[in-house]
Image (tube, grey):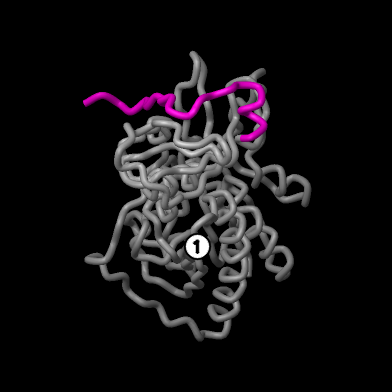
Amino acid sequence: MNIIFMGTPEFAVPCLQCLLQERHQVSLVVTQGDKPKGRGHQLAFPPVKEYALANHLPVFQPVSLKSEEAYQRLAQEKPDLIVVTAYGKILPQKVLDLPPYGCINIHASLLPRYRGAAPIQWAVINGETESGVTSMQMAAGLDTGDMLLRRSREIPPEMTAGELHDLLAQDGAAVLAQTLRELETGKLRPEKQDDALSTYAPMLTKDLGRMDWTKPASELHNLIRGLNPWPSVTVPFRGKRLKIHRTRVTGEDSSRAVPGTVLSLDPLTVACGQGSLILEEVQYEGARRMTAAEFLRGHPMTVGSVMESNKIKE
């Protein structure tokens, strides 16, 4: 089949790689524009563009797919199918209707749960024990199209969103390969989504990463691993920010301690609204990522001291 691929971040690269390995003809790769990156704010290519150029594929970076110019650029490729993976822009109906086989999307959740921009992170933040990927026939709504194939994966209690992301990216490629094989043989059986079961996974913001020690330890643990690697959970510490990368929930009684109280230094244990949290890996502003024990050697603390919260005041 002649395929146009649309995708932008690292998550989408294995799907594009899969199309080439399966020997499909990818006539055009559509991705978002280059963006400033790093301290120097140098323009950087999206990961999908980097991979496409390395494999000598033509790249198209429209500001919007709603313009007639963008539509004509897609139409001139005469695609049989458009494959979309984390492209990040809404496809207008005119584009959805362009290929004879329509548009197939690889979404990083078990639809209809976690429709939207950040399904991996919100599954972890909400303490889900299972996630997965779904291939679907795209429709006008936000991740509302008929489901084609799904593959589930367990989320262990210590897994971060970044670790789950990498696994689901590979699962997405496998699901895409199977979806296209069944599409070509006529075996696909689309299944409508039950809107009553749908949940929404909005975009992440830095404000989500504010620490509120009054919350239960289990909830904070899920937030920390769900926002790892970005935007991360931070807490004020001696005039700077302390980024918390990894934690573990402990059964140590904190009922008599003010939330944020340091209960132990080995391991570094902090009281929460319910239960307590062991800080395992942290990163002080301007420093490298390190274990809590390494951090304490350079920044001594005492049992009974209270760590600040930086929650948004109501």
Give me the residue at 50% from left, 16% from top: 238
Quarter of the rendering occupied by the C terminus: top left
Q: How many marks?
A: 1
Q: Quadrant of the N terminus?
A: bottom right
Residue 299 falls inside the magenta stretch = yes
Closer-to-camera residue (187/128): 128
Q: Tell me the quarter of the picture where residue 292 sits.
A: top right
* Residue 19 spot, x, y in % from top left: 67, 64
Name which residue type carries label 1.
Ile
**Residue at the image point whose x is 63% and y is 50% from the top:** 29
Q: Position of residue 78 (x, y in %)?
A: 57, 60
Q: Position of residue 109 (x, y in %)?
A: 44, 61
- Residue extending furthest top? 239
Work out whether residue 265 can be spotted.
Answer: yes
Residue pictured at 60% horizontal, 21% vertical: 299
Is residue 91 something that shows in the picture? Answer: no
Q: Quadrant of residue 59?
A: top right
Residue 284, above or below 163? above
Magenta-tinted stretch? 293-314
Residue situated in front as seen by the camera: 272 or 85: 272
Left or right of 93 on screen, residue 182: right
Q: Is residue 264 left or right of residue 218?
A: right
Callout 1: helix, strand or loop?
loop
Mark 1 — residue? 155
Residue 287 placed where, x, y %?
A: 65, 23
Q: Label 1: how many residues lie within 10 Å, few (<14), some (14-19) or many (20+)?
A: some
Closest to the observer, 117 or 288: 288
Q: Quadrant of residue 80?
A: bottom right
| Residue 187 lies in the magenta stretch | no
Q: In this picture, is 32 found above or below 260?
A: below
In the image shown, does 33 or 275 lie closer to the viewer?
275
- Residue drawn at the location 45% of the way across and 74% of the way down: 148
